């Protein structure tokens, strides 16, 4: 007879408890990062005109796309391979593994920074063709961001490698808290002094300089602590590792770029096809999506190394348990956000200033798509950790084709709403396809008891009650909290209890 989920959770050293602790810290940091991201968006939207705000969002979208390409898919490889090497007793290859992943990122990021610098005028003319007065400032902002592109790529790669050692603290402290806080403070300072668009770009990207140095130190520290004494490696082993690393990571490199394009290319397309002002409306309306994605990252990054280890040794039962438990937590956190934002879209958009309420339907469309995406859990990551990176690539390319095709068709007619429809269809495709694949090929799925309970509770409290008016809206939060308490065992929330010391 299979043990009850809470029996597994309460075992000393249970991986789910470790995931819960890491996930909780990561979620707290992600909440801060998401909140500061919304605040930065508010400052930019309020400080700059709609056209310059659109230029800022287009420039940062190009910056993130360039950094995603420079990382070469190592967001997965630098977790999968350290976890796999440790699980299979080959820790003497960890140093070679890190060099294999990090050195190419450094080289390619510098190359792409040069490309971004040189092509900045062309990018600015393409995305600001209807606002000639903004082109000069837009070009300067793109070149400011190009200087910091290698630091962004290296920061993410270094912190990814620390997570391969199950170390969540560097990501939380350095990326979620320090970088986000510095971005908010610097952007707020620029807004108070009323400086120009390039200065906003500098304030937003500047914190990467500090964080990159600290991330390198954090990786050096965890690597030194886990390095086996007197271990030696042979050239043949290193050569085989490099081949296997890039055979696994290569498809993921393309997939990660396509994944970032799914999240960012729509802003560039709205700017190019609809104008900078609609691009600003679209970026502001979809800002809550980034908050939901941070929550997803907060949980999935904690689960990722444990899941990789379970799949590396063929423990499908443990992998399925981790996947279902984490998805239940994800739904519990993100569905209330999506449902509330959809209900209160008008108030949410009014917060950013005049003219942004035009994005109300954009919010509703994206919120519905995010319910589907988060209901599937971190399915993309599960597929990659199972070694199916080529499948992952195919799925993302299909989704990217859907979003670009629909954007080109719909944006000229419907503006930001057309882009939202394209992204929503792409998100649905990019989650349902891998969901079918992990079920058939890996034998896991996200729909455990906790996932179903979290979904029904969220729909009842934040999907149905707000239709009763202000009274229903006020009742939704206490009803939700009461439901969470009553369903705490089904939701596996006991994993978040502090570990009690064993009796001597």
Image (spheres, grey):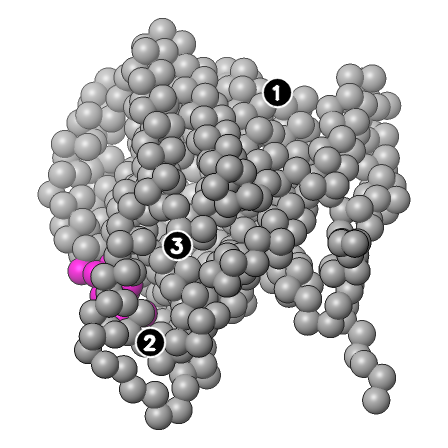
Going from the N terminus, do you reach mark 2 or mark 1 first?
Answer: 2
Residue at left offset 36%, top offset 46%: 389
User: Where does the C terminus fall, quadrant-wise?
Assistant: bottom right
Q: CA distance from mark 1 to mark 3?
A: 38 Å
Q: Is residue 26 left or right of residue 189?
A: right
**Residue 55 falls inside the magenta stretch:** no
Number of other residues with Cα within 10 Å of mark 3, as a class: few under 14, some 14 to 19, many 20 or more: many
The quadrant of the picture occupied by the N terminus is bottom right
Q: Which mark is residue 346?
A: 1
On the image, the x and y values in percent for residue 421 come to 45, 17
SS type, badge 3: helix
- Tell me the residue that label 2 is attached to: 93
The kind of secondary structure element at disc 2 is helix
**Residue occupying the far left of the picture:** 118
Q: Nearer the viewer, residue 344 or 184?
A: 344
Q: Residue at x 28, y 39 (%)?
A: 62
How busy is the neighbourhood of tag 2: few (under 14 within 10 Å), some, or many (20 plus)?
many
Measured Cα–Cα span from mark 2 to mark 3: 17 Å
The residue located at (57%, 44%) in the rendering is 444
For the residue pair 160 and 124, the one nearer the viewer reads as 160
375 over 229 or under it: above or below: above
Q: CA distance from mark 2 to mark 1?
A: 54 Å
Image location (x, y in percent) of residue 471: 86, 23
Q: Residue at x 81, y 23 (%)?
A: 465
């Amino acid at each position: 007879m299979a043990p009850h989920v809470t029996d597994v959770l309460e075992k000393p050293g249970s991986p789910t408890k470790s995931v819960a602790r890491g996930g909780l810290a990561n979620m707290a940091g992600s909440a801060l990062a998401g909140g500061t991201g919304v605040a930065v968006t508010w400052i930019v939207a309020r400080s700059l005109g709609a056209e310059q705000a659109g230029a800022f969002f287009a420039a940062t979208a190009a910056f993130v796309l360039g950094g995603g390409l420079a990382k070469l898919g190592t967001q997965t490889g630098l977790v999968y391979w350290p976890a796999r090497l440790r699980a299979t007793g080959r820790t003497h290859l960890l140093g070679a593994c890190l060099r294999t992943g990090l050195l190419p990122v450094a080289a390619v990021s510098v190359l792409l920074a040069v490309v971004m610098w040189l092509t900045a005028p062309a990018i600015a003319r393409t995305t600001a063709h209807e606002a000639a007065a903004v082109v000069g400032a837009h070009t300067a902002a793109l070149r400011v961001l190009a200087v910091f592109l290698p630091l962004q790529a290296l920061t993410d790669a270094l912190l990814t490698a620390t997570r391969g050692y199950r170390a969540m603290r560097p990501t939380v402290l350095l990326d979620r808290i320090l970088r986000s806080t510095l971005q908010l403070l610097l952007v707020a300072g620029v807004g108070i002094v009323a400086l120009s668009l390039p200065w906003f770009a500098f304030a937003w990207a500047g914190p990467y300089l500090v964080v990159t140095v600290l991330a390198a130190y954090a990786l050096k520290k965890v690597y030194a602590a886990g390095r086996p004494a007197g271990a030696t490696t042979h050239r043949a082993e290193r050569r085989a590792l490099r081949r296997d690393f890039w055979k696994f990571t290569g498809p993921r490199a393309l997939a990660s770029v396509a994944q970032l394009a799914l999240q960012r290319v729509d802003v560039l397309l709205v700017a190019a096809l609809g104008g900078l002002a609609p691009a600003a409306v679209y970026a502001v309306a979809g800002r809550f999506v980034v908050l939901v994605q941070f929550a997803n990252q907060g949980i999935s990054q904690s689960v990722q190394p444990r899941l990789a280890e379970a799949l590396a040794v063929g423990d499908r039962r443990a992998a399925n348990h981790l996947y279902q438990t984490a998805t239940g937590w994800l739904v519990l956190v993100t569905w209330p956000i999506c449902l509330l934002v959809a209900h209160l879209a008008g108030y949410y958009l009014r917060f950013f200033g005049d003219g942004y309420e035009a994005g109300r339907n954009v919010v509703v469309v994206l919120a519905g798509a995010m319910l589907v995406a988060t209901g599937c859990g971190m399915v993309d990551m599960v597929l990659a950790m199972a070694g199916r990176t080529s499948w992952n690539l195919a799925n993302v390319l299909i989704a990217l084709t859907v979003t670009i095709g629909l954007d080109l068709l719909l944006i000229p007619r419907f503006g930001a709403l057309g882009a939202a429809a394209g992204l929503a269809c792409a998100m649905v495709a990019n989650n349902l396809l891998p969901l079918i694949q992990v079920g058939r090929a890996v034998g896991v799925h996200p729909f455990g008891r906790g996932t179903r309970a979290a979904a029904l509770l969220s729909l009842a409290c934040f999907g149905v009650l707000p239709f009763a008016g202000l009274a229903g809206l006020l009742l939704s939060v206490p009803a939700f909290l009461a439901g969470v308490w009553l369903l705490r065992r089904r939701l596996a929330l006991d994993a978040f209890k502090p570990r009690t010391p064993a009796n001597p």
